[in-house]
Image: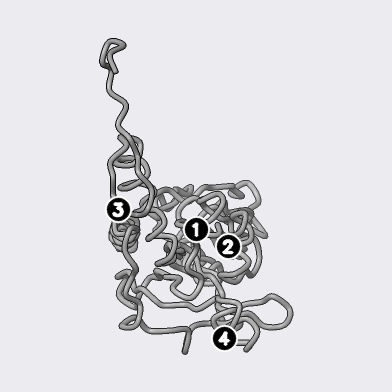
Amino acid sequence: MWAKGWVRGVALLGALVLVGCTSIEVDHMPGADGLPLMDGDGVVPEVEYRIRPGDDLDIKFFYTQELNDQVKVRPDGYISMQLIDELKVAGLTPKAVDDLLTQKYTAHLKDPSVSVIVRSFKGFRAYVGGEVAVPQVIPLDGGMSVMQAIYRAGGTLPTASMESIVLIRKGKNGEPMPYHLDLSDEAIAAGRPDTQVALTPSDIIYIPRSPIANGNRWVQQYITDLVLFKGVQLGFGVNYIIEENDDGDD
């Protein structure tokens, strides 16, 4: 189940956060080659929407309108319908759900002409974390690239390592797959495909800290905060005198 894969993906993200004080090795990760890209109109080509938990559906019957219903896809992927009880729809396209309902209602109705309309796409979202202004869940209203999602999260912090971005995506069997994206100024100027990678539902984008920022953070935490305030002489050409409370004696 993708739910378990999502948990593994979040765990992987947590691991990346925990090692934030060191540089992340991304050379062994696959790059943007083969990932869906945004076209000029902001559309993800050849990606068919599949219903997800949390989506709101309109079920309309052409001849038996008394059976019309508005249903929400439950967390387990099922919906409840009159006459046929429960039906699993998560992971199916609206057309596939239409066909499935027509098949199920054939035993109850003479002409079960059904239309399925997705009214809201609650499960169509991604997560942006790491060195961004506001780590958050991003609703994917229409096509959106990784770069656009980062801008939606307020942009990156000065400490971001833009050449080492990690994209965690669902694999063919539901397992989390990490990809390395380079969104540095050089990559953008060269027009690399990384800049046009399209997001898919439940993607996780993690922007790590740059090695320089890590070094500065180490200096701040372990020297400035823990040592220098005590006045320890470190031999850097500046003497720091420890001020002891000696009750006024010289």
Q: Which of 35 and 220 is in front in this view?
A: 220
Residue type marked 4: Pro
Residue 3 at x, y = what percent? 33, 58
Mark 4 lies on residue: 193
- The disc, 3 or 4, on the residue closer to the chain's N-terminal end is 4
Q: How far from the left and from the top, in percent, is residue 223?
A: 32, 47
Q: Is 130 placed left or right of 57 in the picture? A: left
11 up-or-down from 148: above or below: above
Identify the element where label 2 is drawn: helix
Q: On the rendered image, what quadrant is the N terminus found in? A: bottom left
Amino acid on which disc 1 is placed: Val
Q: Earlier in the sequence, mark 3 or mark 1?
A: 1
Which mark is on residue 128? 1
Amino acid type at image mark 3 = Gly
Report the Cα–Cα distance between label 4 and label 2.
16 Å
Marks 4 & 1, CB-CB < 8 Å contact: no
What is the crowding at mark 3: few (fewer than 14 residues within 10 Å), some, or many (at least 20)?
A: few
Which image quarter: residue 23? bottom left
User: Dot 1, how many residues are within 10 Å of its Cα: few (below 14), some (14-19), or many (20+)?
Assistant: many
Label 3, on which residue? 235
Q: What element carries label 4?
A: helix
> Which residue, given by chain and number where applicable, does mark 2 sit on?
150
Q: Which colour assignment does the render follow? A: one colour
Are the residues tagged 2 and 1 within 8 Å (C-beta)? yes
What SS does tag 1 mark?
A: strand
Q: Which residue is drawn at 40% across and 70% down?
A: 169
